[in-house]
Each structure stands twice: as structure tokens, then as C-alpha cells.
Amino acid sequence: MSFLVDKDLVSQFGSLTLKSGRENDRGGFSIEPEIQADSDCGGGCSTCH
């Protein structure tokens, strides 16, 4: 399996780690960034948990 990732995404978030539901305790596959987004973003988007 191959993933193509835009260079701007990598420069903003660093490396990406693929995790299974067992590893992330969310019950499903996830992609976790090395560099986390700021936590004070306001919570307006649907992708934040």
C-alpha cells in the first residue's frame, strides 16, 4: 500500500503514523501527525475530536 502526501502537509505536520483501532483506542484506523495542531483552534471543524 502506498500513500502520496503533499510536501506542504509534511512540512506542517511532520511524519505521519498509521495506527490501528487497538493502538489509538478509537475503534478504527487513524493517521496521527508527529506535530500536533494548536489546541486553541476554536473547535469549529468537524475533524477534531
Image (cartoon, rainbow, N blue to C red):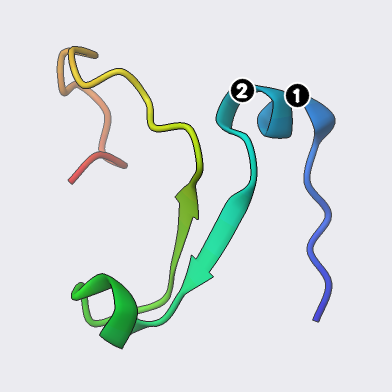
At label 1, the amino acid type is Asp
At label 2, the amino acid type is Gln
Question: Do the numbered discs 2 and 1 sit on residues whose CB atoms are within 8 Å?
Answer: yes
Crowd band around label 1 with a 10 angstrom C-alpha radius: few (<14), some (14–19), many (20+): few
Q: Is residue 14 left or right of residue 30?
A: right
Please tell me in which quadrant of the rendered image residue 25 appears.
bottom left
- Say which residue appears at 59% left-offset and 52% top-offset: 16
Crowd band around label 2 with a 10 angstrom C-alpha radius: few (<14), some (14–19), many (20+): few
Residue named by callout 2: 12
Secondary structure beneath label 2: helix
Total label count?
A: 2
Residue named by callout 1: 8
- Say which residue appears at 42% left-offset and 76% top-offset: 29
Residue 26 coordinates in the image, percent (x, y)? 21, 73
- Say which residue appears at 80% left-offset and 82% top-offset: 1
- Say which residue appears at 21% left-offset and 21% top-offset: 39
Please tell me in which quadrant of the rendered image residue 18 appears.
bottom right
Image position of 41 with respect to 18: above or below: above
Image position of 19 with respect to 14: above or below: below
Q: Is residue 35 left or right of residue 8?
A: left
Image position of 26 with respect to 49: above or below: below
Residue 31 coordinates in the image, percent (x, y)? 49, 59
